[in-house]
Image (cartoon, rainbow, N blue to C red):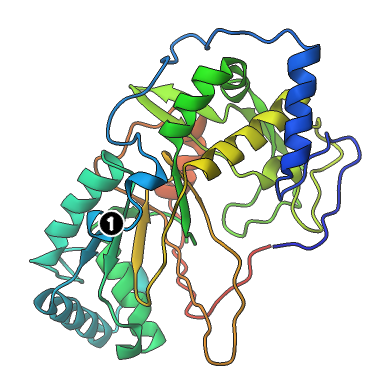
Amino acid sequence: MPTVQVLNKTQPNITYLPDRKNWQERTARRLAEEELTNELPDGFPEQLEGPKIWKGVDYEGQEEKWVYTLNPQELEEVHEAVLEFEDSGKPLSEIAKDTTFRLPTVGPKLKQLIEDDVVEGRGFAVVRGLDPDRYTRLQQVIAYVGVSSYVGKRGLQLKHVLASSWTVYNEIAKERPDLIETLASDWVFQSVDIYTSDYSGTSSFSRPLLYYHQKHLIIQYARRNFTGFGKNPRRDDIPPITEAQAEALDYLHYTAEKYSLSINFKKGDIQYISNTSIFHARNSYSDSAENRRHLLRLWLRPENAWETPEPLKELWDKLYVNDREEIFPLEPTMLV
């Protein structure tokens, strides 16, 4: 996390790291001075229902509800698949379910787990049991990518604190429908290179953050796009966000924080998250000589993934449809 943030002076008083006092003052000021709508945007439901409606307290202390622990036979199946692929000498981009990475028993189980619990269910799951110390760095990547090949199609190449965006929506829709309208209206994004997370380009585009499409609520954004991050402020050549947008960003953050679930990673865990229905963040941490954290991230699209709203299709095509070279770094890389 940045200790100092460079600010764009045309922006509202908002930073990448949320400030509760600023949020409360902005909310009080807008409620006192502005005439805010009490109506939700057309097509948006008053309240959502279903398994994606949960609060952190619903799952605290109940890991058995979201953790799938691989048994010895399943771990050996993964191990044999890792060794077989390594011996083949094929590039990592050729890792594929049922052909170059065969998991006849555990593969279908994991596929069904993700489709039921992550895409249609609560929105997250953890697969536990792999031992990274059993493998070289190359074998670790083969295991991770190979197991995940049964989850969905790979996109581009952590997350410990989660909250349901559906639960957050229900509270905001009830208490502040004007902010749902704000979130569902166009926001100006500064373009980012999705391959490197480089925000230094000169282009921009507009789209909503929030969608209700085919009876699915979808929210897609990164806070840094609108607040700046560290030494990279939001650019001066694009419009600043509005006071309403600044309040909406903080309202999302603090409502998600209220209903969040903290998950403690164990060594070797694989965590799958529905990025369209789950808010996710990672607490800060410090490495030591004895304990160094190494996280791998992989973007996946399951076969039963929700239909993509039109404003998001260009991004999704870059991730999952367009031809591109797959990159599998074996050592940690620093994103801009």
Q: Is residue 241 visible?
A: no
Quarter of the image where one finds residue 181: top right
Q: Residue at x 20, y 82 (%)?
A: 79
Along the viewing direction, whichever of 136 and 201 lies nearer the viewer: 136
Q: Quadrant of the N terminus?
A: bottom right
Above or below — where is 264 with respect to 268? above
Q: Quadrant of the C terminus?
A: bottom right
Above or below — where is 47 with respect to 62? above
Above or below — where is 3 with respect to 300? below
Quarter of the image where one finds residue 19: top right
Along the viewing direction, whichever of 100 and 112 lies nearer the viewer: 112
Along the viewing direction, whichever of 43 and 176 lies nearer the viewer: 176
Residue behind mark 1: 62
At mark 1, the secondary structure is loop
Q: Residue at x 73, y 16 (%)?
A: 31
Q: Is residue 122 left or right of residue 251?
A: left
Q: Position of residue 78 (x, y in %)?
A: 19, 76
Q: Residue at x 47, y 61 (%)?
A: 157
